[in-house]
């Protein structure tokens, strides 16, 4: 039952997921109060404590088939990765990026007006898949259509889920605020490509195939390979033990905010500089070297007076070897720069630029937003943003505060609200926080 629930959660997370600017939490919305390395803004109304209740931020950026286009079930009810089902939606280059974080619980305390610390637990997932149309064609149609051609079928892939236990601190001095966070990571499951050369050539006039490969696919408790027609999404680990597993890692995040004046601030943030070592039940599938299949003459195949029997030899040529070596994967490193200007008491303008490097892919995103306080306890936001893989998108956001409760919900693409799973682009967050307690000096001033 635990495996079924976790697999369902993973597939749902894949559908909901994250683009480049949301590998790191978006800087567009200044009062998006989800847990982050910048938590000075969370202590509103001179509050001393903040409790981060369960919340979610996620996003997806994709070009070509969506993740749900690949999934199907066989007659036994097992979940399969089925590329043939995704072929009608494929483009020349197909890219899928997604990820997010489900915050379990967090707590922050403002020690004084200049120092605050916070701690939280969350479960995160990140993914990047990048492959050419030729690879999907070849996988689904076999080698019958590539006479006289050499195909580069190389692809990249990183998919991982992990628990993150984070401790962060902010220090304010005059107009400068600096902060940092360290996260201890415990890996749940992973599937990633370490090397990715896969060349196939079929000589003209003869069914003669040559492969030149140097790839290695690593996995831990996620992908099970039997043959090219049977690749299963299969979580085989113990989720209860994954909270503190043998798959361990560390990530660092840094933050700095400079106030030019009371109305204008600039922020720079570096997020998720780290890696995870996968040592729990690792499996490696690799193929290295040059192999060939002599085949049969195409003239014999075309001659109606001759009977020729042959089969697609891809599986034999790849000669996939299974091993059990531990390995390491890097997190998506993200750098963000943002600026805020308080135009008047009710209107705030912001802009942000993001750069993310993950699994060999460089992604850029830029956006601008405006936030208006409709009432003292209600604010609405709208944004305009653009990223490497997607056209311009319009976003919306809202914050509602009453008493000690602060609710927030934001998205960078309003069109994704109706159908998150199939959306080509979105970054969204939703959550609730509690604020309580006052500084002693505030209590004394109230009495005076």
Image: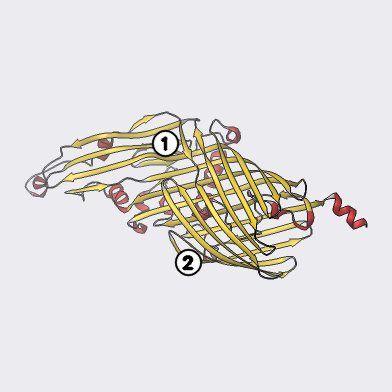
Q: Is residue 224 above or below residue 437?
A: above
Question: Which residue: 41% across, 51% down?
Answer: 70
Residue 188: horizontal and vertical position, in percent? 54, 38
Residue 104: horizontal and vertical position, in percent? 65, 45
Mark 1 lies on a secondary structure that is strand
Please say which color scheme the image uses: secondary structure
Q: Is residue 77 above or below residue 66?
A: above
Measure how far apart labels 1 and 2 are at the Cα level. Answer: 36 Å
Q: Decide if residue 249 is on the left or right side of residue 228.
A: right
First reached walking from the N terminus: tag 1 or tag 2: 1
Q: Residue furthest right?
A: 448
Q: Is residue 110 above or below residue 216?
A: below
Mark 2 lies on a secondary structure that is strand
Q: Residue furthest left?
A: 305
- Asked where in the image residue 79 lies, by quadrant, the reply is top left
Q: Is residue 440 above or below residue 243?
A: below
Q: Decide if residue 51 is on the left or right side of residue 201.
A: right
Which residue has dot 1 on it? 218
Which corner quadrant holds the N terminus?
top right
Is label 1 or label 2 in front? 2
Which corner quadrant holds the C terminus?
bottom right
Question: Which residue: 37% across, 40% down?
Answer: 230
Which residue has dot 2 on it? 392
Residues 393 and 181: in front is: 181
Q: Residues within 10 Å of mark 2 (few under 14, many from 20)?
A: few
Q: Are marks 1 and 2 in contact (CB under 8 Å)?
A: no
- Asked where in the image residue 225 lies, by quadrant, the reply is top left
């Amino acid at each position: 039952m635990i495996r079924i629930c976790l697999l369902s959660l993973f597939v749902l997370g894949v559908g909901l997921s994250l683009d480049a600017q949301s590998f790191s939490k978006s800087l567009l919305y200044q009062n998006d109060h989800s847990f982050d390395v910048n938590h000075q803004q969370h202590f509103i109304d001179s509050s001393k404590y903040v409790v981060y209740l369960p919340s979610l931020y996620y996003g997806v950026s994709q070009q070509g088939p969506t993740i749900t286009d690949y999934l199907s079930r066989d007659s036994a009810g097992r979940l399969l990765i089925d590329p043939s089902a995704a072929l009608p939606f494929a483009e020349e280059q197909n890219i899928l990026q997604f990820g997010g974080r489900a915050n379990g619980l967090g707590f922050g305390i403002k020690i004084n007006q200049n120092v605050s610390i916070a701690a939280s637990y969350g479960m995160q997932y990140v993914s990047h898949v990048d492959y050419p149309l030729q690879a999907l064609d070849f996988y689904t149609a076999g080698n019958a259509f590539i006479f006289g051609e050499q195909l580069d079928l190389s692809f990249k892939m990183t998919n991982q889920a992990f628990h993150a236990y984070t401790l962060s601190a902010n220090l304010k001095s005059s107009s400068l605020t600096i902060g940092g966070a360290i996260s201890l990571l415990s890996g749940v499951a992973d599937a990633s490509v370490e090397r990715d050369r896969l060349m196939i050539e079929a000589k003209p006039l003869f069914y003669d195939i040559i492969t030149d490969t140097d790839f290695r696919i690593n996995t831990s408790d996620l992908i099970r390979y039997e043959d090219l027609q049977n690749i299963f999404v299969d979580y085989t680990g113990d989720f209860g033990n994954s909270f503190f597993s043998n798959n361990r890692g560390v990530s660092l995040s840094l933050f700095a905010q400079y106030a030019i004046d009371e109305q204008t601030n600039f922020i720079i943030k570096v997020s998720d500089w780290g890696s995870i070592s996968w040592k729990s039940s690792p499996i490696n599938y690799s193929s290295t070297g040059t192999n060939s299949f002599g085949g049969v003459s195409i003239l014999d195949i075309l001659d109606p007076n001759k009977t020729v029997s042959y089969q697609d030899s891809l599986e034999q040529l790849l000669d996939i070897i299974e091993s059990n070596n531990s390995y390491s994967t890097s997190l998506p490193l993200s750098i963000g720069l943002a600026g805020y200007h308080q135009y008047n008491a009710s209107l705030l303008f912001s802009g942000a630029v993001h750069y993310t490097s993950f699994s060999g892919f460089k992604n850029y995103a830029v956006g601008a937003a405006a936030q208006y306080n409709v009432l003292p306890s209600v604010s609405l936001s709208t944004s305009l943003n653009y990223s490497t893989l997607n056209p311009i998108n319009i976003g919306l956001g809202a914050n509602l505060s009453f008493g000690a409760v602060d609710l927030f919900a934001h998205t960078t693409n309003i069109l994704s609200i109706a159908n998150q799973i199939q959306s080509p682009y979105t970054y969204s967050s939703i959550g609730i926080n509690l604020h309580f307690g006052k500084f002693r000096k505030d209590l004394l001033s109230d009495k005076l």
